[in-house]
Structures are given as structure tokens and as C-alpha cells.
Amino acid sequence: MHTNVNELFDNLWQNYLTVTPSADKIHTLLGEQNGKDIINDHIALRTFNIEKVNLAKLSAHFEALGYKDCGDYDFVAKKLKAKHFEHPNTELPKVFISELLVEEFPQNVQTIIHKMVDQISIDAVTADNFPYSGTHWKISHAEYQLLLEESEYAAWMAAWGYRANHFTVSINQLSQYSTIEEVNEKLKASGFVLNSAGGEIKGSAEVLLEQSSTMADSAVTNFSDGDFTIPSCFYEFALRYPLPSGELYTGFVAASADKIFESTNVKG
Ligand code: OOG
Ligand code: NI
């Protein structure tokens, strides 16, 4: 486990950039004239609910640094559960971690996933770098495609493994933009493609959170039978609204998250 939270996020960010070149460009685009560093609202990580590597195994890396469990979410159709974690230092990103409910899938899918997880060494799960350690297994492109038929999430995990699947710009902390529409227009004018599932803007002022995201970049990954170019990671944008107390809402909105997951979809 890391003892330095900034080092953990720096490593997650560098690892994310290796397969998400547009994140660096967007960071520059929104950061110029900002006059201060971009603040990340949250990052997200994915895993399987198999005991060896489940959500709790990933969250342990953040809880060891002071993060607390602050919310539960269910995605019945996608067969996922998630939690979000917050740090007492509110400048640090929130962490959204989901896990795939493996036992709800057909036997052939379960077999492939168990075969992958069996290849992870038990020590790798508690090693400092586990949250950005990528894949620990070999799978074929045919197995990837089989997973894709049942779950875009399972296929993404098989290809990319443990890493931040997105970082999220906090629009509240951008000095030159005050609405999510302005951010989206700037991104589109610069050639970035937004996820339009359920509309480009997910959520509303009423639910205290508005979100948008790019569609994932494409990157080359190595399967046991060769290299293939597939969707990698994306960048998200979030604008939070105040609660009656005046504090900004810090939770997530399941109906919006359900659509954000689709930013890594292969099939539109
Ligand atoms: C997480 C999707 C949900 C949000 O902000 O609601 C999410 C994922 O794609 O792994 O990030
Ligand atoms: Ni997100």
C-alpha cells in the first residue's frame, strides 16, 4: 500500500496518460488561462467481485490513506455494484470503484474471468502499484470478443485491467467556465467526441450533479494472438450544486453513472 496519497494519484495519472493521449490535450486546453492547477473531482476504477480482487481489495489501497466509504450504487442491468470513497482533505479526488457480479453471467463468461483472476499473484493485490498494475493475465482476442457479447465492462477489464478508467475535471474549480454547456462546446470545437448516451449532459441541477464525458480514446493492446486497437480510457467533466447547507453535493447519481460506463463501449 502507498503511504503517500499524492504519489498514488501521480502514478495513476501517468499510467492513464499512456493509453489516453487526449487527456493530456484536454488538460492543456482547459488548463490554459485557468491560472491554477486543474482539480480532479474523482477517478474511477473497475474490478470483478471475486474475493481475491473484489471492490474491497481495491478500496483498501485508498482506505489505508484515509478514504472513507460514502455511498453504494447498484446497476442491475449491467450487473455491477459500486461504492464511492471520500477523503477528509476535500482537495483530493473522490474515488468511484465498481465490481462486476461475475456469478450472474453465463458459464463460458465466468470461466474466462476466473481463468484471468487465477493468474494474479496474491501478493500483487496488496502491492503499492495494484491500482495501476494493468492486466495480470493472457487472453485471446476471441475470448475478448466473447466477453464483449455479454458485457462491455467485462471486455474492457480483460483488455486493460487495473488502472484509472477516467479522471474527472471539476468544473466548479475552473475559473473561465461556469456551465457544463460551455465546457462541452469548447471540447467539441476542438474535435473531441462526447458520449451522447442519454444526452451529452447526464443529470441536472435538481439532482445536484451534471456530468459529461469524452468517448474513450483508442489504443493498442496485446492479446495472446496479437495486437488490436480497442477503446481505452476517457475523460469526464463534473459540475456539482450546493445542498441546502451550502456545501456542494459529494455523491454520485446512479442513472447518470449508468450512462457514463458506456464511454468505453466498442459498439455505439
Ligand atoms: C464508472 C462510471 C460512473 C460516474 O462519474 O458516475 C462514473 C466507470 O465507467 O467505471 O464514473
Ligand atoms: Ni466518473
Image (cartoon, rainbow, N blue to C red):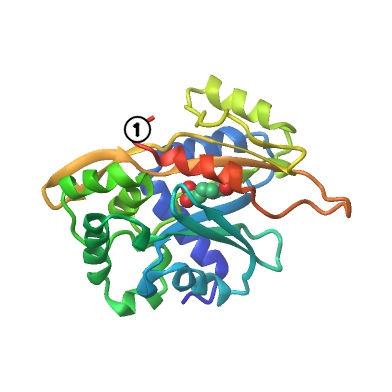
* In the image: residue 54, left or right of residue 28: left
Q: Is residue 229 above or below residue 51?
A: above
Quadrant of the frame with the C terminus: top left
- Residue receiving disc 1: 267
Q: Does the image show residue 212? A: yes
Dividing the picture into quadrants, the one containing residue 229 is top left
Residue at (61, 57) in percent of width and height: 93
Q: Secondary structure at mark 1?
A: loop
Residue lying furthest left: 225
* In the image: residue 245, left or right of residue 268: right
Residue at (34, 52) in percent of width and height: 154
Q: Nearer the viewer, residue 64 or 12?
A: 64
Q: Nearer the viewer, residue 81 or 177?
A: 81
Q: Position of residue 119 (x, y in %)?
A: 22, 69
Report how many numbered discs are placed on residues in the image. 1
Q: Position of residue 210 (x, y in %)?
A: 67, 38
Residue at (52, 61) in percent of width and height: 9
* In the image: residue 117, left or right of residue 236: left
Q: Is residue 184 above or below residue 202?
A: above
